[in-house]
Image (cartoon, grey):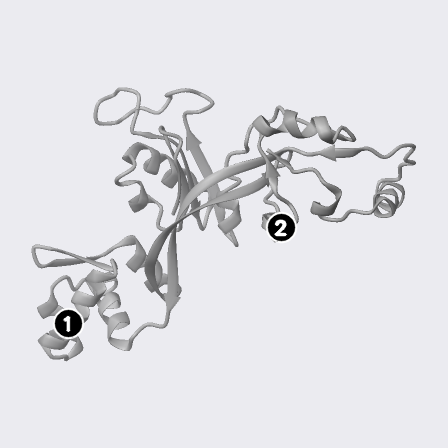
């Protein structure tokens, strides 16, 4: 992908600024200026949108009771907190509805969203699944800034459209890249601290073995990136998510991550 051509539709980068950058920041002496079309990675992702809310007091104490107090029934929670069973039951139904708590035959447990909410002190509520296209520099795989998403100024041109447009705009020179998309570029967008690790079969083939069968682990996931507080934990979680398959991978990525399915679909968690 490349930015569409047209002097009135590109983000301005004056020739004077280009000359100053080359001379003073790069120590070079320019002799000629070329107008280029630069490659851009267009990556379609599916992301789960979580809204962060303030905890209701009883909700937070119920989740702490399950996670920290070893209390796994409504009756145990009501007795420990000194609350009416009906009030506890109503709150647990709400926490189950927003996917914070699971109830398996009366045994309560926190989901990954519930654990993350309790850890961060904010009640996360899943509102919707969002699909969008993200753009990355074709050479460094760094994300493009917000102005590049404004189609009124910088529309993008697909490779299939490039030849047609260049016939009318021959003063631009297209530049291509042979570098593949860098592993972990998506996960780094959400990484404020901690570490990220990627495990996959796209480069080394099916080298991971399913411990249950002893055969190559063809689980439906070809690459998993995990975020975690440490590099070691991120590495372990990335491999566990890949081996778990699409249905259970999220359980191994409580801090977030990115899955690439065999179908080519990309899922951000």
Give the quadrant of residue 220.
top left
Q: Could you tell me which residue is drawn at 85 percent across and 41 percent down?
A: 22
Q: CA distance from mark 1 to mark 2?
A: 50 Å
Q: Position of residue 73 (x, y in %)?
A: 11, 64
* Residue at image mark 2: 152
Give the residue drawn at x 37%, y 41%: 237
**Closer to the camera, 157 or 244?**
157
Mark 2 closeness class: few <14, some 14–19, many ≥20 residues within 10 Å: few
Q: Which residue in the rendered view is the most extreme toward the front?
A: 168
Q: Which residue is mark 1?
A: 90
Residue in the foreground of this view, choosing between 37 and 233: 37
Residue 260, position as x, y percentages in the image: 40, 34
Question: Disc 1 on helix, strand or loop?
Answer: helix
Dot 1 or dot 2, earlier in sequence: 1
Circle count: 2
Name above or below for residue 210 compared with residue 236: above
Q: Position of residue 205 (x, y in %)?
A: 41, 20
Can you give x and y, in whole percent of width and height, for residue 193 in the image?
52, 53
Residue at 35 percent across and 25 percent down: it is 208
- Please tell me in which quadrant of the rendered image residue 158 appears: top right
- The secondary structure type at the circle numbered 2 is loop
Residue 73 appearing in the image:
yes
Q: Residues within 10 Å of mark 1 (few under 14, many from 20)?
A: few
């Amino acid at each position: 992908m490349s930015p569409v051509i047209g002097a009135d539709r590109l983000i301005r980068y004056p020739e004077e600024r280009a000359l100053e950058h080359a001379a003073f920041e790069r120590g070079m002496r320019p002799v000629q200026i070329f107008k280029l079309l630069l490659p851009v990675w267009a990556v379609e992702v599916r992301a789960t949108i979580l809204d962060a809310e303030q905890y209701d007091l009883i909700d937070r104490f119920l989740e702490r009771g399950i996670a920290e107090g070893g209390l796994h029934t409504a009756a145990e929670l009501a007795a420990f907190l000194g609350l009416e069973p009906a009030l506890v039951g109503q709150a647990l139904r709400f926490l189950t509805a927003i996917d914070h708590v699971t109830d398996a035959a009366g045994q309560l447990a926190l989901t990954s969203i519930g654990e993350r909410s309790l850890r961060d002190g904010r009640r996360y509520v899943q509102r919707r699944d969002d699909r969008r296209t993200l753009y990355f520099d074709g050479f460094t795989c760094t994300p493009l800034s917000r102005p590049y998403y404004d189609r009124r100024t910088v529309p993008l041109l697909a490779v299939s459209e490039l030849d047609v447009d260049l016939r009318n705009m021959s003063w631009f020179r297209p530049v291509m890249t042979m570098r593949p998309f860098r592993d972990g570029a998506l996960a780094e967008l959400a990484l404020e601290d901690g570490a990220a690790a990627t495990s996959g079969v796209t480069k080394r083939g099916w080298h991971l073995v399913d411990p249950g069968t002893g055969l190559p682990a063809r689980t439906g996931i070809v690459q998993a990136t995990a975020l975690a507080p440490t590099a070691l934990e991120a590495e372990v979680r990335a491999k566990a998510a890949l081996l778990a398959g699409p249905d259970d991978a999220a359980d191994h990525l409580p801090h977030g991550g990115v899955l690439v399915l065999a179908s080519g679909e990309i899922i951000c968690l």
